[in-house]
Amino acid sequence: MDVLNLSLGGGARPNDVLVNAVNSAVDAGVVVAIAAGNAGPGPGTVESPGIADKVITVGASTNPHFIGIPVTVTSIGTFGAAIGQFANFVPAVTTTYVTTSPTNGCTPISGSLAGEIALIARGTCSFSTKIRNAQTAGALGVIVYNSQQGDPVAMAQDGTPNQPTIPAVMVSRPNGLAMANIAPSMVTVDGTTPQEFFTDGPSADILASFSSIGPPIMQGPGVGVGQPQDKIKPDVTAPGVNVYSSIPSFGCASPPCFAFFQGTSMATPHVAGSAALLIQLHPGWSPEQIKSALVNTAHRPVKSFSSGTAINDPMRRGGGRIDLAAASQVTATLEASPSMVGTGDGQASFSFGELPSAGITRSFDITVTSVSTSTVTYSIAVAPAVAGPSITPSVTSLKLAAGATGTVTISLTISPSLATGAYYGDVQLTGGTVPLNVPYWVTIDPPPSHGNGCACRLV
């Protein structure tokens, strides 16, 4: 086989046998794409074997479309509401909608909702709990509005007994807030004509709230669990929200059967499939070259699910959302490794790891391999997203003949006065058909203090 797609994960630990196995698969010439995990949004949540350095670890971002039904509100207009595992509004309903007390519907709702639709905020408790409380208060239906940026998602039942039977759908956060601002008002919800809603722009490329992020734990012998590793994970993101996928025939009434799913397990097959297409285009490329093409041409920016602003930290979004069109046009592939080690660790990005705020210099090499049929001259620059350490390339221009290889050394210098925190950005190579970006990352700790003036470590 040429490509492995792995949708599995568990607690990360040093010397994990799964990590060793998938790294060995890459050494054997196989491209391995692995789900980062759905344990986000907290740091250090990338799971095993997604922490393996040589694989392509995949986070999930929004896919800006969904299957839903039209909702029409006087003075706002018509927009989509996502349908899920709860009853649909069939036949269509026209009535008054109201907000609830509490607004999230997680405890018994005060007052009567008889003949009305309840408008409830997402969050804190399960969808089943919210809808059940609204049904108990007499509501004939529920509209939940999203608490996160992006499209509404298909709501799932929580598996508890006595699931609510009234219809319920979800609308986006902006539409829900607009509804709340004029509540009570009239609404028409028509479940008789499900359709696909396309929401490119603000709803595209938002990092999913569940997507696991770095830094990953150390994998070396004798290293404490929970310490940052000298690699960036995830490597990339791909569509993992509202992904339309097949389901077994026993899971639906009339095969063939499809449904919408969320998860890094939905994002990873996008990367595996992209890798397969690149291998078909370049059958002689190594797994490291396939990884570089996907990571170093990834789309920027990926945005925050809470604020909608660009995420620049590669420990959250890796290189960015994959861009297969750009990956297929690269004129060079890149491989980053510590200067004292040389090439061979399969990294398309580089983490300096965790360093003290002291007079320290570190460096890594970027090996640039031409995959062009002609000579290309690359301009090399460092573009910090968070400035602080001095980060400089050994050369600012690199001329490569067809099939040739060159090396650029990137040096990091930390001053004792540098504030603690994370610093990151990109090493940019321009001049080819598409620009190439190598993400870098370092976190700075307070300087060591031992009371005796010794800059040493007690073991």
Image (cartoon, rainbow, N blue to C red):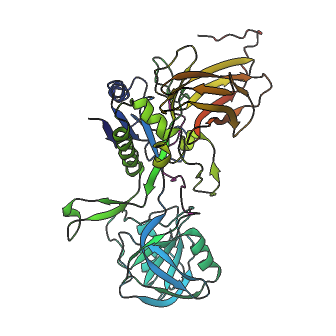
Q: Is 196 one of the magenta-colored residues?
A: no
Q: Is residue 235 visible?
A: no
Foreground: 302 or 43? 302
Foreground: 216 or 383? 383
Q: Is residue 430 visible?
A: yes
292 versus 107 height, above or below: above
- In x, y percent, where is residue 9? 37, 39
Left or right side of 32 for 152: right
Foreground: 101 or 312? 312
Which segment is the magenta one? 201-217
Outermost residue toward the front?
A: 374
- In x, y percent, where is residue 198? 48, 69
Count of numbered labels shown in the rendering: 0
- In x, y percent, where is residue 150? 54, 63
Residue 24 in which image quadrant: top left
68 versus 123 height, above or below: below
